[in-house]
């Protein structure tokens, strides 16, 4: 019997553990495809932590995966000097091509370690991000060494120098000079500097597609507008990203008078623009930059200061007009959707972006998601801004969607709404939010009787959303407005009504029943 059992067992087909059918399908993938899968666990830019844990964990799955990752140099190319020196040396030994380096300068010891490790590999550095918290001396020592070692592969350079002003050290009154030159950085295409002096040679900027400047980036004896424009002209043909934030130049100071403005600079390929400055400097720079209407991201953040020689505050409309020269106006005029927000001292204009891909560069994350973002603060509270101010600066004829948010003490007047509605003849979506305890005027203006003719304001309106202080007190006017429009316009597809004060926002069945005939979908918030 035992022999018969053995015979039966031996008659079963044997398993070939070396056959492809035995291995999981993931192990039968070509190495190239497997690396594409592993790359999903790796951030596209320099990681925020010392070790990118995603692909490190993958090495623990099996020997095959570990062998694949060890031989793939792209997983070892991000070098962060917040890591232990032994880990950095291991990464460098396995990175066979270009490397991406990040250094946060916090001590002389770290600079010595970084210098000794990176100098022999300076030719491999493709991206270098350095942040200095020690006042510039250690940073200068590190970068001088790397520059003289030559970095022919470097394409992206980001240097942030936390400048410590020292009245007893003249060299601390301006940015540090690192001797940047085209000979030492022949392939540089993305540059971000804070308190680091720019070289004067136009040849240095011939390949730049991204430029970000913050603080003191110009020599003390030549910190002029012409110095900046000379740099921008050298990059104008290929520049795609530009950021100018709190830059320090003598003839761009708020007290400086510009007698002979220089010629403007064309930036035909600019896709993303960022500026953070006071309204005087911002308006002067914007007058000189021809930003194309195809720009996919325009960001302007400004605080309001008095004009030179005039201590009185300008009206919010005057400030807005100065900040919107013709190239910027063209950007807004091409918008189909705008969001306007006002309170006593601030004014903002936004156009949400519909399809915008954020570039994976060190200079990228400073940009918002909106295609247009203009924020003006510190306006004169005695002359608060109004949403209608934008009508006097740009044409809104192409606008189909408008959002108004008002935090003013009183409601927006009839004249404001009439000006806006006349400027937006094709408006099909309107959202209004007013925090004032007074009654909103928007329904009063939307009624046909107030237009003076049979043509109602916003005749193409499909979507209407209104959030007011006390909703229940406004239902009668809403019904009256919709009833007057019914013979002349199509039924609203969507009506949303909300109250700033929840306990005053409840509607009874009779209110909802009165609204139903005029809308396809009714939402009460």
Image (cartoon, rainbow, N blue to C red):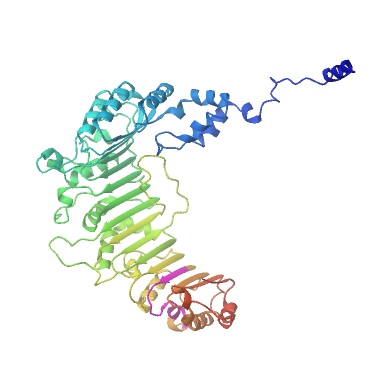
Image quadrant where residue 151 sits: top left
Res 110 visible: yes
Q: For the N terminus, which image quadrant?
A: top right
Q: Is residue 277 left or right of residue 476?
A: left
Q: Residue at x 20, y 61 (%)?
A: 305
Residue 100 sits inside the magenta stretch: no
Image quadrant where residue 306 sits: bottom left
| Magenta-colored span | 430-448
Res 237 visible: no
Q: Residue at x 34, y 44 (%)?
A: 241
Q: Position of residue 524 (x, y in %)?
A: 53, 72
Q: Is residue 248 left or right of residue 472?
A: left
Residue 436 sits inside the magenta stretch: yes
Q: Is residue 230 left or right of residue 27?
A: left
Q: Is residue 19 above or below residue 179?
A: above
Q: Position of residue 334 (x, y in %)?
A: 41, 58
Q: Position of residue 124 (x, y in %)?
A: 36, 25
Q: Position of residue 251 (x, y in %)?
A: 15, 50
Nearest the viewer among 10 and 170 is: 10
Image quadrant where residue 420 sits: bottom left
Residue furthest front as drawn: 2
């Amino acid at each position: 019997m035992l022999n018969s059992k053995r015979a039966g067992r031996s008659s079963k087909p044997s398993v070939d553990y070396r056959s492809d059918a035995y291995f999981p399908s993931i192990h039968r993938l070509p190495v190239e495809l497997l690396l594409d899968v592993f790359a999903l666990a790796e951030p596209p830019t320099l990681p925020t932590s010392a070790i990118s844990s995603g692909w490190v964990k993958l090495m623990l799955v099996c020997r095959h995966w570990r062998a694949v990752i060890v031989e793939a140099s792209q997983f070892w190319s991000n070098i962060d000097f917040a890591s232990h020196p032994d880990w950095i040396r291991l990464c460098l030994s396995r990175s066979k091509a270009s490397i991406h380096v990040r250094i946060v300068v916090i001590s002389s010891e770290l600079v010595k370690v970084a210098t000794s490790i990176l100098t022999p590999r300076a030719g491999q550095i493709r991206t270098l991000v350095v942040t200095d918290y020690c006042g510039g001396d250690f940073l200068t020592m590190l970068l001088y060494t790397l520059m003289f070692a030559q970095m022919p592969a470097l394409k992206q350079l980001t240097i942030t120098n936390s400048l410590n002003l020292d009245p007893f050290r003249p060299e601390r009154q301006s940015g540090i000079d690192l001797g940047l030159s085209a000979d030492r950085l022949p392939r540089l295409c993305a540059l971000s500097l804070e308190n680091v002096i720019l070289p004067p040679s136009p040849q240095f900027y011939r390949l730049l597609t991204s430029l970000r400047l913050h603080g003191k980036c110009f020599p003390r004896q030549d910190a002029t507008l012409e110095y900046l424009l000379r740099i921008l002209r050298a990059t104008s043909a290929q520049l795609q990203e530009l950021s100018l934030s709190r830059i320090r130049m003598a003839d761009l100071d708020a007290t400086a008078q510009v007698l002979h403005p220089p010629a403007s600079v064309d930036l035909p390929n600019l896709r993303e623009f960022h500026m953070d400055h006071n309204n005087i400097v911002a308006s002067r720079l914007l007058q000189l930059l021809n930003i194309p209407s195809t720009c996919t991201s325009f960001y302007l953040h400004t605080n309001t200061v008095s004009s030179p020689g005039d201590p009185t505050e300008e009206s919010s409309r005057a400030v807005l007009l100065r900040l919107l020269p013709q190239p910027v106006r063209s950007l807004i005029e091409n918008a189909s959707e705008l969001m306007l927000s006002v309170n006593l001292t601030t004014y903002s204009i936004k156009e949400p972006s519909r399809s915008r891909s954020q570039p994976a560069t060190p200079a990228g994350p400073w940009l918002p998601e909106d295609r247009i973002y203009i924020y003006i603060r510190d306006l004169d509270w005695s002359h608060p801004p109004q949403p209608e101010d934008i009508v006097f600066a740009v044409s809104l004829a192409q606008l189909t969607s408008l959002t108004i948010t008002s935090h003013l003490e009183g409601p927006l007047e009839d004249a404001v709404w009439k000006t806006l509605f006349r400027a937006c003849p094709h408006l099909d979506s309107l959202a209004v939010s007013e925090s004032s305890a007074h009654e909103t005027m928007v329904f009063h203006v939307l009624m046909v009787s107030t237009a003076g003719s049979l043509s109602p304001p916003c005749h193409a309106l499909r979507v209407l959303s209104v959030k007011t202080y006390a909703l229940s007190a406004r239902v009668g006017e809403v019904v009256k407005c919709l009833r007057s429009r019914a013979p002349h316009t199509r039924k609203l597809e969507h009506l949303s009504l909300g109250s700033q004060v929840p306990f005053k926002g409840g509607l009874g069945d009779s209110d909802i029943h009165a609204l139903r005939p005029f809308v396809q979908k009714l939402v009460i918030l």
